[in-house]
Image (spheres, grey):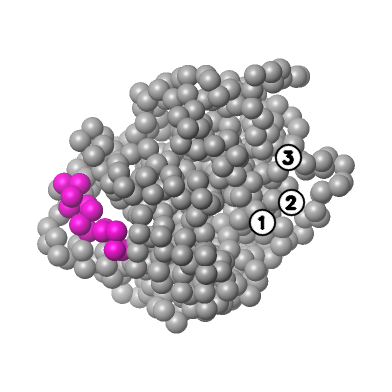
Amino acid sequence: ERVDASGLLVFPGFIDPHVHSRDPGQVAKEDFAHSTLAALCSGVTTLLEMPNAVPPIGDRTVFEERAAAHERVASVDFGLWGQVFGASNLDDLPGLLDAGAVAIKLFWGYALDKRTKKLVYNTADAAPGDVVAPPDAGDVLRVFEVVGAHGGLLAAHCEDREVVLGGERALGREVRTYEDLLAGRPALAEVAAVSRAAEFSRVTGCRFHVVHISTARALEIVRAARADGVPISAEACPHYLWLTAADYARHGAGMKVFPPIRGAQDQEALWAAIADGTVCSVGSDHAPHAPEELGGSLAARPAGVHGVETMVPLMLDGMARGRITPERLAAVLAGDTARLYSIDHRKGRIAPGLDADLTLVDPHREHCITAAALHTKHKVSVFDGRTVRGAAVASLLRGEIVMRDGEPVQPGRGRLVRTSAATLPDPVGAAA
Ligand code: DOR
Ligand code: ZN
Ligand code: ZN
């Protein structure tokens, strides 16, 4: 089969580095077959899966089990994140990195409920004895040291637990309005966590990535630290780039996500940070919930939005509107993301001998994002009804056409990608 690429733009296959497929453990919300099929249909060819399923990927044994299970159903190539809980699995990190975990996620300020193997935010949520306490500063420093010593990438959800608990206590009642939500999780929560992370990164030399950054001030901290030689970087997500707090009037609880979506100035700062490289990677933070969980009040609805199938069209729309250049789009959706997660020897570059993951884009094709037409398990999108300009019209995975016009041609061909520290030979110069 051939594709006529006249009039199209050819990009390295797009990478979504931040997906929660909830599989295994919470497959009523989503599963890996659906999330990777949805990714495929949008123009993504590689997805990096977050480790906090049940059980979480906290050691090499779970890593290999998860890899084998996911390889049976994956429609795009995938890498796996590993997870650290502080001191309790510090010794497992070298094994995870050697196995090829693309990065290590620190669930900073969260604890692991040993009984349910689920993360809990507040240790009061679980019975005594069931919980490993959140890591203290000493544990966190050791995590940075161990990951840094192995050349790994460490990342964390950056909302300082003390600031959040203080904000919630100051509110003194259930969250009712969007202002309440922002009061419980103010910019200061992110700023405090990011400045701490920057200093840990500075003293240990460990590479650190701020996922889903949301505030102008935290971006300034990352920018200044980078200028100082600190190996820190940041990720932006489409919902922070396309929505502001003002959209709550229209979307209501449907746009509840942590950290919360903030004001127009923060949004402008995110686009500027993409342009100047402070943000080197864009991910969806696909965090699906089942429809029956989404109907409740702002307080009751769990945080997180669907996003794996809408990231690429939204970013292409940003390109059509002149908010991002084609070069920066290729970087944040492929090249720089591949380098960040050390999968660049296989993904995210167009060069002889690489494995020919390509996404073909029609920059002029207008279409309406329609939740009902999505390929995720639940057909939910806060962007339902939005008209965007630009669409991925075909994808090649390792040289084979796997997607056309938003529908799968060859689903189920995804394979595990291990980070380059592991066993894969560098294929540059080898036969494709
Ligand atoms: O809103 C969120 N939902 N933020 C996170 O960081 C986690 C996510 C989820 O997994 O539901
Ligand atoms: Zn997070
Ligand atoms: Zn996430």
Residue, disc 1: 342
> Under 8 Å from ligand 3: the CB of mark 1?
no
* Vertical order, 220 against 137 (above or below): above
Q: Is residue 159 magenta?
A: no
Residue, disc 3: 350
Frontmost of labels 1 and 3 is 3
Point out residue 95 in the picture as x, y percentages from the top left corner. Answer: 65, 69
Mark 1 and mark 3 residues within 8 Å of each other at the beta carbon: no
Question: Which amino acid is tagged 2?
Answer: His
Residue, disc 2: 345
The residues bearing labels 1 and 2 have C-alpha atoms spaced at a distance of 7 Å
> Looking at the image, is mark 3 or mark 2 earlier in the sequence?
2
Of the pair 254 and 199, the residue shown nearer to us: 199
Quadrant containing the C terminus in the rendered view: top right
Quadrant containing the N terminus in the rendered view: top right
**Secondary structure beneath label 2:** loop
Q: What range of the chain is rendered magenta?
A: 177-189
Of the pair 321 and 89, the residue shown nearer to us: 321
Locate residue 132 relative to residue 180 in the image: left or right. right
- At x 31%, y 63%, the residue is 189
* Vertical order, 381 against 157 (above or below): above
Point out residue 184 in the picture as x, y percentages from the top left corner. Answer: 22, 59
Question: Which amino acid is tagged 1?
Answer: Ser
Locate residue 397 relative to residue 62 in the image: left or right. right
Frontmost of labels 3 and 2 is 3
Locate residue 19 relative to residue 46 in the image: left or right. left
Mark 1 and mark 2 residues within 8 Å of each other at the beta carbon: yes
Residue sticking out furthest to the bottom: 138
Point out residue 14 in the picture as x, y percentages from the top left corner. Answer: 60, 39
* Vertical order, 27 against 142 (above or below): above
